[in-house]
Image: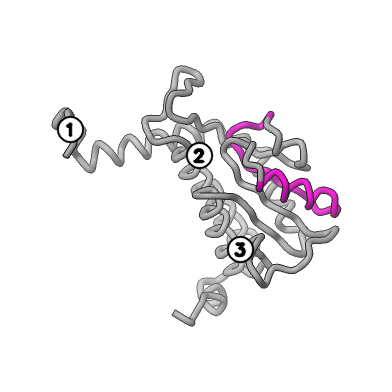
Amino acid sequence: MQKMKTKKNELSIMSATRTIINEISYVLDGIKEDEFKKLIDAISSSRNIFVTGQGRSGLVARTFAMRLTHIGFTCYVVGDTTTPNIEKGDMLIACSSSGTTSITCHIANLAKRLNALVVVITAHPNSELSNYANLTIEIPATETGQVIQSRRSTQFRSTLFEQACLVYLDAAILTLVRLLNREEGEMMKRHANLE
């Protein structure tokens, strides 16, 4: 068993959660308000919404799809067996920290060629994935080892991006709930009951 050399305060749940919350807060302070408004407008005006992403980014995208369904939007996860064709008037939301994940780039390229609106959420707005985007939303999170504005995440790889992306998309849901005056009872009717 590997021997751990740590300071006592590094073993505290309060210390660990404070680190995570502070990092997420720092990232969200760098979000561009105009990009958020454009995302809300795009969702509101789309017929069908498709989401994609790989790994933990994909799990965040799935979470967002579930919440969009709860508040009354028609939403699909790319790759599920019941996902229909994407067409003009639909939108794809593609989540990737690096913006270089080959499958996500391929799917975004296909959606663009099929005349769907493509929204990319990434930590790297100048990456390949953004080439296919009508709207790129930057989540300015750094991976371990990268330093931007003298800040470095202490968490593993793209964990900070995924956490900040989840909060960002939950903020979009809350904003849509308020704009559409959705009631709890109405949303509960769309919640899964085969569980």
Q: Give the residue number, with chain letter if any, for mark 2.
A: 161
Q: Which of these two is toward me, 142 or 137?
A: 142
Q: Give the residue number, with chain letter if any, for mark 3.
A: 68
Q: Position of residue 95 (x, y in %)?
A: 61, 46
Residues at marks 2 and 3 touching, judged by CB atoms closer than 8 Å: no
Secondary structure type for disc 2: helix
Q: Position of residue 158 (x, y in %)?
A: 48, 37
Residue at x 78%, y 59% (from the top left corner):
90
Residue at x 17%, y 28% (from the top left corner):
5
- Give the amino acid at mark 2: Phe
Magenta segment includes 109: yes
Q: Which residues are magenta?
A: 103-126
- Give the amino acid at mark 3: Leu
Q: Is residue 50 above or below residue 81?
A: above
Q: Is residue 116 above or below residue 3?
A: below
Q: Which of label 3 and label 1 is nearer to you? A: 1
Distance from disc 2 to disc 1, alpha carbons, whole Å, reads: 27 Å
Q: Give the residue number, with chain letter if any, for mark 1.
A: 4
